[in-house]
Image (cartoon, grey):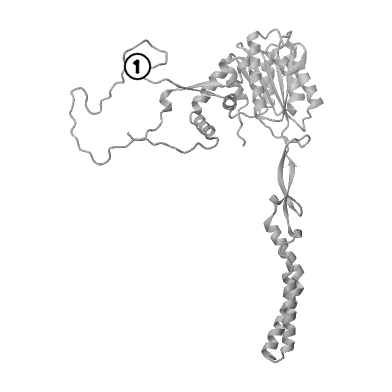
Amino acid sequence: MSYVIDRRLNGKNKSTVNRQRFLRRYRSHIKKAVEEAVTRRSITDMEHGEQISIPGRDTDEPVFHHGRGGRQHGVHPGNKEFTSGDRIQRPPSGGAGRGQGSASNQGEGMDDFVFQITQDEFLDFMFEDLALPNLIKRHLTGADSFKTVRAGISSEGNPSRINIVRTLRSANARRIALTHGKRKRLSQLEEELARLQREEPDNLQAIRLLQDDISRLRMRIEAVPFLDTFDLKYNLLIKHPVPTSKAVMFCLMDVSGSMTQATKDMAKRFFILLYLFLKRNYERIDVVFIRHHTSAKEVDEEEFFYSRETGGTIVSSALKLMHEVIVERYPANEWNLYGAQASDGDNWNDDSPICRDLLVNQIMPHMQYFTYVEITPREHQALWHAYEEVQESFPDYFAQQQIESAADIYPVFRELFKRRVEA
């Protein structure tokens, strides 16, 4: 038996790189485990990590070993039980360590490989391939992010930003400008000296005078420095404001008496998924929480998820308050407007047409996307049918889905916010 021993020292963050490679390799197992975990978790346990189990057969690693090599000759005895092409049945399982079946004196196996993924990794898998649709509007007001961009050349700056090419070009231009007349005069004197030495070699005095003039000119030319502080040029960098996409999500939840505790819990789980998704994927986004029964009220996160207030049902009160908030704080020409509404579908009979008119005439013309989730196992009621008319008017900006049980929450959430392929 031979062993290959790697004695190289671990590089910085090598464990992190290996973990990311491992997560990519078993992405399908982890993604399936995350989807199952979301459906069974409670409201307060949504942000935690998850324990992932991978079948042992899927964790096999390649093994290096020495082969026999060469051409081998041998005689193998036959047998009475098997012939060429027969399939040998696997021994019966037993004692595999997975807690199923009764004790046995035969068989062997391997436990599943179990490991823990962190909270960040869990959320990455949970919100993979999701995005807010139609996030296109951009505005500079209140931008708090900048990027450094090149803005030409400056005569002053940090030595680390010196532009060598421009500096040498400037030095060369300066030397040419300062010595141009002297070089021209030097060329003339050299030609005159050559003529005298050729035609009047005995005129030593004139030749000596020309040589002295040439020597003085050369000294004056060489006295011009190769590089001067005036020649130094630096790359000028400035901070340029980056347009940030400003978005606001309106969360409208029905807390009327028709909503049972189980229905309210499913609505809260849907909105917690939405809230985690927004906060994790978008740095600059506002979330407005609105609870309603017969009247609507804007509340904070704590009251939205944990208040026990209840009453009758007038859905239009929430839509009216949403429109008022848009007009007061979120002008449509500056903000991406999104809405998500959850209800059991029960509504005061005369109110559903009002909801439809509010959406069609006042809200949807300014929205980037609006989703309606109806949490009920029953048949759809008047509110759902009224919203169907809204969807016909705004097919690309309005979507509605039904949730019958907790297992439907995550699939519906992914369907509503899946990443659209741009045409």
Q: Is residue 93 rendered to the left or right of residue 321?
A: left
Q: Nearer the viewer, residue 309 or 164?
A: 164
Which x, y percent locates residue 248? 73, 27
Which residue is depicted at the point 32% across and 37% down?
66
Which x, y percent locates residue 97? 40, 16
In the image, residue 188 sits, relative to residue 38, either above or below, namely below
Is residue 407 in sight in this rendering?
Answer: no
**Which of the image's four quarters has the N terminus?**
top left
In the image, residue 173 sits, relative to residue 164, either above or below, namely below
In the image, residue 164 sits, relative to residue 3, either above or below, namely below
**Which of the image's four quarters has the C terminus?**
top right
Q: Is residue 376 rendered to the left or right of residue 138?
A: left
Amino acid type of disc 1?
Ser
Residue corresponding to mark 1: 93
Total count of labels: 1
Q: Residues within 10 Å of mark 1 (few under 14, many from 20)?
A: few
- Which quadrant holds residue 309? top right
Disc 1 is placed on an element classified as loop
Which x, y percent locates residue 420? 61, 31
Which residue is depicted at the point 25% across and 25% down?
86
Which x, y percent locates residue 62? 39, 33
Q: Nearer the viewer, residue 277 or 411?
A: 277
- Which quadrant holds residue 187? bottom right
Q: Nearer the viewer, residue 314 or 252?
A: 252
Is residue 70 in sight in this rendering?
Answer: yes
- Which quadrant holds residue 176? bottom right
Q: Is residue 104 rendered to the left or right of residue 333?
A: left
